Amino acid sequence: MLFANQVIDGLADGAIYASLALALAFSYRSTGIVNFAQGEMAMLSAYAVWQLMTWGLPLVPATLISIAISFAAGAALYAGLVKPLSRANLLTVVSVLIGLYLALNSLAGFLWTYSIKALPSLFPKAHLQIGPLSVSIETVGIIAVVACVLLLLYLLFERTKLGLAMRGAASTPDSAELVGVPVPAMLLIGWGIAAALGALSGILVAPRVFLNPTMMFGVIIYAFAAATLGGFDSLIGAVVGGLLVGVVENLVGTYIPWIGPDLKIVVALILIFGTLLIKPDGLFGRRKVARL
Amino acid sequence: MNVVIKPRPPLAARVIFAAVLAVLFLYVIPFAIPNYLVSQLATVLVFAIAIIGINLVTGYGGAITLGHAAFVALGSYTTAILVVSYGWNPYATIPVAAGLSWLAGWCLGFPALRLQGLYLAMGTLVLSITVPALLKRFDGFTGGVQGLNVGNPESPVKWLDDSQWIYFVCLAVAAILYFVAARILSGPLRRAMVTARDNHLVAAVLGVDRAPLATATFAMSSLYAGVAGSLYAMIVGFVSPDTFNVMLSLSLFVGAVVGGITSIGGAIVGAMFIQFVPTWASDIDVSLGGLVFGVALIVTLVILPSGIGGLVGRLYDRACVRLGWTEAAQDERDERQTAGSIQNEPA
């Protein structure tokens, strides 16, 4: 039973990693940039929820408003910082993103101090009894929320004209431009969605680790591992990678005492270097069309 | 044959310049300023050593690493463990730390060759986030969270106190490593590295064997970081896992960019920046340090892509032209014809 419980907990962690990995994959597919600051943006989104709640809003509206703000912030980041960088050399791109990472991290410390804060969970603190398994509602809820978001994204990309235009803009920008797709606007929306997905991961993880400026360090590592494992340009890969990383990380932490909970982070390092050395495109890389 | 004008000040000017530098580093810093600043400036020299390593691998090798703290940690812990557990003389541990980090960098150089651009930056960033956890896990060697108490080496000279002594040790090591780097970057090896960085195809056609060159660059840069780590352990007298966190890696990267990513002379400016600016900023607000780093990084790249070192270099060239301190030299383009022999030169 321990095994089944660990797998389910792993899936919940994995769902959080998957949403952040999806955010990374979104920005990578549209602009070829690995957004090092994605985790810090997600952390700010979680703080935004906390701030809105201290101003008196209930949790759910605060969450939705924070996700909307994150969408706008992601789009603004694309317009203000990423688009001007599209022709810059790699060192400049990396430096600007690292600069952003440092600045956002300090900004959170500046605005909300470094002392930890509690963010309430979106789900009640109870356990579900499924047969012999006892699973917390939070675990099930996280998996359900991320699954719903994936379904929405699938519908967006496969069933709407906007989704088609976004896929076109990401895969072949020149041709898309020729058939009348406003490519920059599509990339703008892509970065917005990425930030919104990141916000979701931040808001889901904050109740589990407490709100503090360094809370995403652990998550972003696993998200990097998930995105690498799945292939950086693949959305389905980010999801599968996220779930795999979550499960593997939990099982390794539980069943290999030599590694234990302290050294779980090394799993991410090994996964990243292993994937990049053995199969640099990841499990699902190189597929140019989004399949969600 | 193309002829270019290169700056070349007359002998007298160069002697005066060298004398000013000597007075500054050998008298003013160790004897004329307050004592606590002396050990801070020793730390600046140590950071400068690590930053020269980043100049080599990122500026000339074109491989962006955000994980140099890992090698600094390796050097620091090599010294700490050898001193604490095996009773070694601290100075004897410097070559060991250098050798071990060279080896580690050489091993990591292979994957680094395969990881292109952003992937390498990401991989090394993750590496540097992992380092403190690893150090804490192997607490049998590393002393875990408590760290290891290395102790400051005592000054063997009567008229130097401990911090002045360690400053001179760092100065000597930094000077040697600076001239080694300057030597590496002065001849055909520099052109081979720059060509391999800017255009793989051209480099291959000219006979530059990129793989061993890139691996050697990575190993050399790790050696610099390892030596820096070893000296750092002696200055602070204490090593603990959380010193070598991701912030240290990113600070060194910021220092390299601000000082000028291809300017090894700028390394000292970058090192002063990362040593003093966060401290001043933290006096105003705790979180301001990171904010200043982040903004400095972005602003430097927008207005001064070659960093402060590059700016000083350009001003120097212009001043020499204005003063007529120039000489005609052979154009680089002609020298490139000899680039075919580079692969036979020792790396």
Image (cartoon, rainbow, N blue to C red):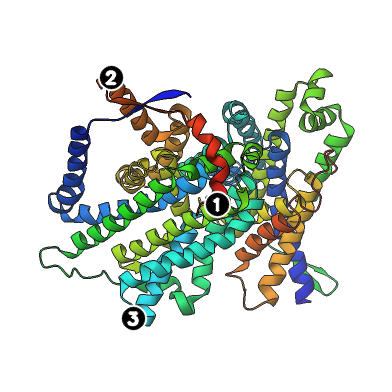
Local crowd at mark 2 within 10 Å, few (<14), some, or many (≥20)? few
| B83 to the left or right of B189 | left
Along the line of sight, the residue nearer the viewer: B10 or A112 = B10
The answer to whether B160 is drawn above or below residue B318 in the figure is below
Residue B13 image point, x, y percent: 20, 33
Alpha carbon distance from label 2 to label 3: 58 Å
Q: Chain of mark 1?
A: B
Q: Secondary structure at mark 3?
A: loop
Closer to the chain start, of discs 2 and 3, is: 3
Residue B344 circle label: 1
| B209 to the left or right of B322 | right
The answer to whether A285 is drawn above or below residue B309 in the figure is below
Along the line of sight, the residue nearer the viewer: A32 or A238 = A32
Along the line of sight, the residue nearer the viewer: B161 or A73 = B161
Alpha carbon distance from label 2 to label 1: 40 Å
Determine the residue located farthest toward the right in the rendered image: A159
Along the line of sight, the residue nearer the viewer: A111 or B267 = B267
The residue drawn where x is 69% and y is 40% is A28
Of badges 2 and 3, the one in the foreground is 2
For badge 1, the amino acid type reads Asn
Alpha carbon distance from label 3 to label 1: 42 Å
Q: Chain of mark 2?
A: B
Same subunit: marks 2 and 1: yes
Local crowd at mark 1 within 10 Å, few (<14), some, or many (≥20)? few
Q: Which residue is mark 2?
A: B322
Q: Which residue is mark 3?
A: B87
Q: Chain of mark 3?
A: B
The quadrant holding residue B207 is: top right
The quadrant holding residue A90 is: top right
Of badges 3 and 1, the one in the foreground is 1
Closer to the chain start, of discs 3 and 1, is: 3
Decide: marks 2, 3 in contact (CB < 8 A)? no
